Image: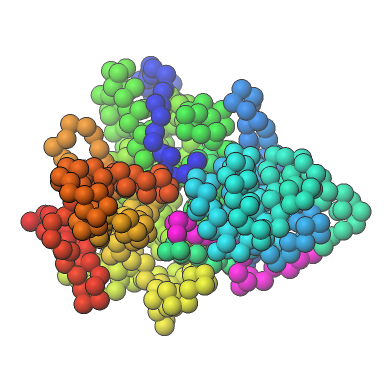
């Protein structure tokens, strides 16, 4: 499930009775423990100081052997199956042992592709704990893009989900350099290049039982290149981000300074794991704390999954949070309880300020719809409507926001749970130095980040690396923002050309333009995110991916004869549709504009995008 798949299905909650007056009168205030309402202003002193992923993995397996680790549904009708830390650890050790002893993949590169599932977690952890270099890629990529990344990463093996089997089978013929194709959820014995992941785990267990400890004994160099994330995963223009164990471990150290997670906590995994955000903060972080992760089956099952798994925390993107907020409030209005809810929000806020937090009791029905235990919601990847965060805090759920990029593995800033600041992107993590480059009169400028979570560099692109990391070690984020007096970062714009969807996906216009410009009938193109028509009756928040095209009239006449303007438009639109088939769905061009004249350009013949778009505004 990619972030672009957040085309929200119909979310249904049961009609709410909302008998909050009864809940309010049933509380024994004399027996209630009064909480200290004084807010701390400094990070937790006992944050972790891990140097590698293997360090905290081994600690958690040893310290929490019988605690829940991963929860996965075998199918929709069966309940969640619980895998303990002990079981997870044994499978990781076994797979790692098999990968290096049977398949000889030590220090080689392995791609992981597939939807969120137990086999993904086991494979990723085995790679990080000593096998080689892992490259998680988007399971929704078209075959040509998968093939491209296999070649670019120089992968020796691909671990894939059965749902990606058809695409992998088609790619096989074109990538003879790949030594092994390992299918998750399969116990197929090694035959040629094909083998099942479950079979490897069993073979690894047999080796370990015979005394083979080669995998456990591997020592991890914190600085060694171990993870390769592709920022867009489409063409040669996409960037490969090289990370090491230290980068990932420092994320854990950073979060523990601002947010407390306990073995009793359970995260709900709804975002795709090939994103650094989900695989690091949604998996490695709870793993480091002995907490568990419950896998969402898919967005159409999100409500029953929430109610069954009963998570305490969710990492998500704005569209999902906003959808849940909207659906719950629709039910409240239908139940004619909106006025009493607003009154209870005011009452409980007053009581909380006095040290009595009764929100979970008063808003019990809302909590029950979300599983009953939810205490933290983290939103990142894109801006969110501030009223949603305020509402969550008002009903007693801590709302946090994070900021970062794949290049910072990913966390650069995070809202401390002890001092929320809704609307900001959070405070710089404790290990980071963040400053504003050439601030204007409002204090706004490009955000520069110096942090131990910063990437090693761009894969096989030293020139591009030097462009974004200055001599002092600061990363030029390309984001525009300011830092307030309390140290919170506020993002106000983007300096790059990147188009950011509502779900937080990045679309690089140059990639699409490069493909469009190969079309004979197109002389030149400029792709941008067009604001939706405010006068349209249809509610539309998402930017419309638009191609502004200068037709090659001479070529058109040569190939198609003299045709009308309408026919030229239709012809180019059909050509764009053909290009769309080669793109992942969220990057597809949705609108075409035929441009008269030429684009305004620099001396190096680059289109002046902002000048071009500013003409529209005028």
Residue 349 image point, x, y percent: 33, 37
Query: Is residue 226 within the magenta segment?
Result: yes
Whether 151 is drawn above or below 262: the answer is below
Point out the stretch of residues depicted in magenta.
Answer: 217-235
Looking at the image, residue 98 sits to the left or right of residue 324; the answer is: right
Which residue is painted at 19% across and 70% down in the image?
Answer: 601
On the image, which quarter does residue 231 sit in?
bottom left
Whether 388 is drawn above or below 515: the answer is above
Looking at the image, residue 309 sits to the left or right of residue 488; the answer is: right
Looking at the image, residue 207 sits to the left or right of residue 230; the answer is: right
Which residue is painted at 27% across and 28% down in the image?
Answer: 343
Which residue is painted at 31% across and 59% down in the image?
Answer: 517
Query: Is residue 58 within the magenta segment?
Result: no
Residue 211 image point, x, y percent: 90, 57
Residue 577 image point, x, y percent: 34, 44
Seen from the viewer's position, the closer of residues 419 and 195 is 195
Seen from the viewer's position, the closer of residues 350 and 375 is 375
Q: Main secondary structure of the magenta part?
A: loop
Whether 434 is drawn above or below 343: the answer is below
Whether 123 is drawn above or below 76: the answer is below
Seen from the viewer's position, the closer of residues 372 and 537 is 537
| Residue at the outermost left position | 618
On the image, which quarter does residue 114 sit in?
top right
Looking at the image, residue 255 sits to the left or right of residue 217; the answer is: left
Tell me the quarter of the image containing the C terminus. bottom left
């Amino acid at each position: 499930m990619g972030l672009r798949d957040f085309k929200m299905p119909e979310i249904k909650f049961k009609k709410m009775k909302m008998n909050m007056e009864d809940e309010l009168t049933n509380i024994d205030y004399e027996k209630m423990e009064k909480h200290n309402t004084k807010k701390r202003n400094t990070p937790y002193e006992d944050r972790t100081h891990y140097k590698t992923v293997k360090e905290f993995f081994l600690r958690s397996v040893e310290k929490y052997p019988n605690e829940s680790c991963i929860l996965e549904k075998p199918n929709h009708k069966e309940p969640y199956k619980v895998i303990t830390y002990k079981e997870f650890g044994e499978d990781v050790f076994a797979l790692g042992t098999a990968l290096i002893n049977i398949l000889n993949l030590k220090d080689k590169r392995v791609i992981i592709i597939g939807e969120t599932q137990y086999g993904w977690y086991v494979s990723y952890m085995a790679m990080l704990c000593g096998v080689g270099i892992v490259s998680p890629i988007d399971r929704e990529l078209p075959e040509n893009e998968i093939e491209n990344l296999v070649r670019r990463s120089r992968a020796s093996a691909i671990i894939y989900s059965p749902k990606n089997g058809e695409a992998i089978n088609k790619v096989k013929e074109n990538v003879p350099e790949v030594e092994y194709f390992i299918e998750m959820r399969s116990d197929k014995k090694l035959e040629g290049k094909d083998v099942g992941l479950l079979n490897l785990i069993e073979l690894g267990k047999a080796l370990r039982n015979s005394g083979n400890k080669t995998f456990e004994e591997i020592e991890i160099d914190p600085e060694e290149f171990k993870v390769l994330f592709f920022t867009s995963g489409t063409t040669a223009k996409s960037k490969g981000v090289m990370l090491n164990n230290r980068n990932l471990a420092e994320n854990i150290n950073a979060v523990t300074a601002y947010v407390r997670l306990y073995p009793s906590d359970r995260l709900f995994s709804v975002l795709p794991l090939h994103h650094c955000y989900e695989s690091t903060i949604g998996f490695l972080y709870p793993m480091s704390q002995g907490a568990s992760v419950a896998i969402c089956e898919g967005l159409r099952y999100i409500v029953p999954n929430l109610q069954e798994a009963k998570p305490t925390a969710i990492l998500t993107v704005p569209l999902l949070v906003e959808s849940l907020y909207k659906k719950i409030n629709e039910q409240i209005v239908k139940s004619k309880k909106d006025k009493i809810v607003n009154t209870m929000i005011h009452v409980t806020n007053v009581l909380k300020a006095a040290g009595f937090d009764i929100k979970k009791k008063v808003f019990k029905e809302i909590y029950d719809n979300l599983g009953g235990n939810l205490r933290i919601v983290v939103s990142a990847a894109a801006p969110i409507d501030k009223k949603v965060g305020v509402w969550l805090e008002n009903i007693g759920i801590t709302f946090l926001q994070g900021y970062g990029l794949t290049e910072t593995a990913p966390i650069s800033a995070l809202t401390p749970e002890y001092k929320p600041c809704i609307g900001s992107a959070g405070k710089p993590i404790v290990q980071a130095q963040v400053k504003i480059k050439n601030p204007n009169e409002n204090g706004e400028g490009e955000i520069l980040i110096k942090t131990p979570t910063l990437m090693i560099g761009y894969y096989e692109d030293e020139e591009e690396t030097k462009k974004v990391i200055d001599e002092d070690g600061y990363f030029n984020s390309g984001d525009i923002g300011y830092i307030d007096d309390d140290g919170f970062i506020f993002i106000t714009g983007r300096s790059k050309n990147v188009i950011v969807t509502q779900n937080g996906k990045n679309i690089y216009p140059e990639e699409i333009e490069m493909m469009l410009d190969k079309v004979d009938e197109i002389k030149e193109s400029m792709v941008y995110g067009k604001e939706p028509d405010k006068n349209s009756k249809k509610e539309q928040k998402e930017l419309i991916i638009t191609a502004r095209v200068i037709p090659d009239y001479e070529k058109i006449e040569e190939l198609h004869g003299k045709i009308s303007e309408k026919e030229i438009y239709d012809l180019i639109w059909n050509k764009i549709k053909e290009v769309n088939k080669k793109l992942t769905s969220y990057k597809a061009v949705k609108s075409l504009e035929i441009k008269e004249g030429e684009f305004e350009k620099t001396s190096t013949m680059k289109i002046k995008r902002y000048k071009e778009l500013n003409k529209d505004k005028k």
